[in-house]
């Protein structure tokens, strides 16, 4: 006896978003940038960590980057802000920048990551930029001294942040209006240059009399 079958429509899933889509490849330029800026951050954190150990052993130790009353790494290392989370800040940098190096090396080797990974990386770097901005303000207006290795980490962090932000915006992982996507596609280099310029101007004006005296 023949039986009639009733077709059951397939359940339609929700549309895929960039966060659900296939893994997204990154330009080799971005991979190299993450590798280089991450390595610069690791180098700075490593040197500061070694100097911190020497400073703990000998309170009279003078780091090599303590050049004058303004560029004085020792003054920064002895400050409370140098251990914002209860341990020396460079220890956090060794982990964070080391992770960025691994991401960059993985991308160069052909790794692809889904949208959630890029958003997580972007969020982590946003925290890094915020933390570095706070340290910069503390250094300029509370500690009243500069650490050259710290300045290297500030620039490295903001460059990698803007590079990853440009990538997430261009690829649609980070939702943005079309003009914003076009801006990052054509002028992705502008935000890190302007950001670095602002830091440079703040440092220049903070000790204008010292630099020009």
Image: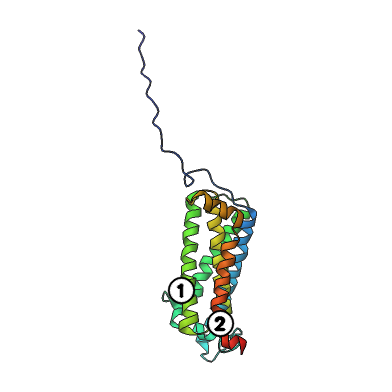
Horizontal placement of 42 versus 143: left or right? right
Q: Which residue is situated farthest in the top direction here?
A: 1
Q: Which residue is situated farthest in the bottom direction here?
A: 60
Percent of width and height locating residue 43: 60, 72
Q: Residue at x 56, y 63 (%)?
A: 191
Q: Which residue is mark 2?
A: 51
Q: Residue at x 36, y 16 (%)?
A: 5
The quadrant the N terminus occupies is top left
C-alpha distance separating marks 2 and 1: 22 Å
Q: Which residue is mark 1?
A: 134
Residue 33, compared with residue 71, is above or below; it is above
Percent of width and height locating residue 2: 36, 9
Secondary structure state at the residue bearing disc 2: helix
The quadrant the C terminus occupies is bottom right
Q: Earlier in the sequence, mark 2 or mark 1?
A: 2
Secondary structure state at the residue bearing disc 1: helix
Percent of width and height locating residue 148: 58, 79
Asked whether the beta carbons under mark 2 and mark 1 sit within 8 Å of each other, the answer is: no
Percent of width and height locating residue 21: 50, 43
- Residue 38 visible? The answer is no
Q: Nearer the viewer, mark 2 or mark 1?
A: 1
Q: Residue at x 42, y 74 (%)?
A: 85
């Amino acid at each position: 006896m023949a039986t009639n079958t009733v077709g059951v429509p397939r359940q339609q899933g929700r549309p895929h978003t960039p966060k659900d889509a296939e893994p997204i490849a990154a330009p080799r330029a971005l991979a190299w940038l993450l590798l280089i800026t991450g390595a610069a951050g690791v180098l700075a954190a490593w040197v500061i960590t070694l100097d911190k150990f020497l400073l703990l052993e000998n309170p009279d130790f003078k780091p090599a980057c303590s050049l004058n009353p303004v560029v004085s790494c020792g003054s920064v290392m002895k400050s409370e802000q140098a251990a914002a989370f209860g341990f020396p800040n460079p220890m956090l940098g060794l982990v964070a920048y080391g992770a960025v190096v691994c991401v960059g090396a993985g991308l160069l080797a052909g790794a692809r990551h889904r949208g959630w990974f890029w958003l997580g990386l972007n969020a982590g770097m946003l925290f890094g930029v915020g933390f570095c901005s706070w340290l910069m303000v503390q250094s300029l207006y509370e500690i009243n001294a500069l650490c050259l290795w710290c300045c290297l980490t500030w620039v490295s962090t903001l460059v990698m942040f803007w590079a990853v932000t440009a990538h997430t915006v261009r690829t649609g992982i980070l939702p943005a209006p079309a003009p914003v996507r076009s801006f990052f596609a054509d002028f992705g280099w502008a935000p890190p240059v302007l950001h670095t310029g602002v830091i440079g101007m703040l440092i220049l004006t903070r000790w204008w009399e010292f630099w020009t005296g």
